[in-house]
Amino acid sequence: MTLEEGRRVRLAEDLGLGEALAGQPAAVVGFLSVGAGTEGTVERVDGELPESEEVREYLRLKALFEDYGHTMPVASRERLETEIAALEPKWAAHQERGNRVTVRVRLDNGLVLDGAHQDILTPL
């Protein structure tokens, strides 16, 4: 799905925003959320989330290993394999997240949802 500025969208799922506070001293009196089906307008599309430094390093080392690993001395190859293995959890988390686009949406009820991932929105 491609979102662009001015496009009407609807929340695909309930969003929990946080605790509602009241009184002096402030006490938790409930939980604020916005229900699925709430509609709004896309104000800004921020683009893909950038890769972290660890993800870029994983990709660099993995390419190095695949291209030149067979020609490396055993100790160097083992050290490279260890470095790649240490970065694999960051790579797996990045893959799980996928290339998500973030947007700013002004909901019809007046709330503004900023930095929202496009997968929680459906176009109208």
Image (cartoon, grey):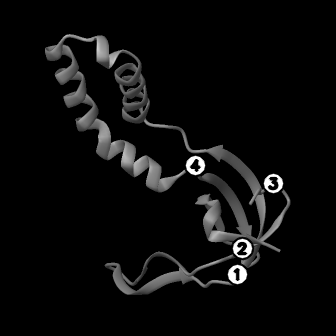
Residue at image mark 4:
99
The part of the image, by quadrant, that contains residue 105 is: bottom right
* Mark with earlier residue (2, 3): 3
- Front residue (pair 18, 23): 18
User: Which residue is found at the position 25% from the left and 11% from the top?
Assistant: 72
* Mark with earlier residue (1, 4): 1
Q: Which mark is residue 4?
A: 3
Seen in the picture, residue 28 relative to 104 is either above or below; the reply is: below
Is label 4 or label 2 in front?
4
Amino acid found under the numbered disc labelled 4: Asn
Is label 2 or label 3 in front?
3
- Front residue (pair 121, 30): 121
> How many numbered marks are there?
4
Is label 3 or label 4 in front?
4
Give yes or no for contact between labels 3 and 1 (Cβ–Cβ under 8 Å): no
* Mark with earlier residue (3, 1): 3
Residue at image mark 1:
38
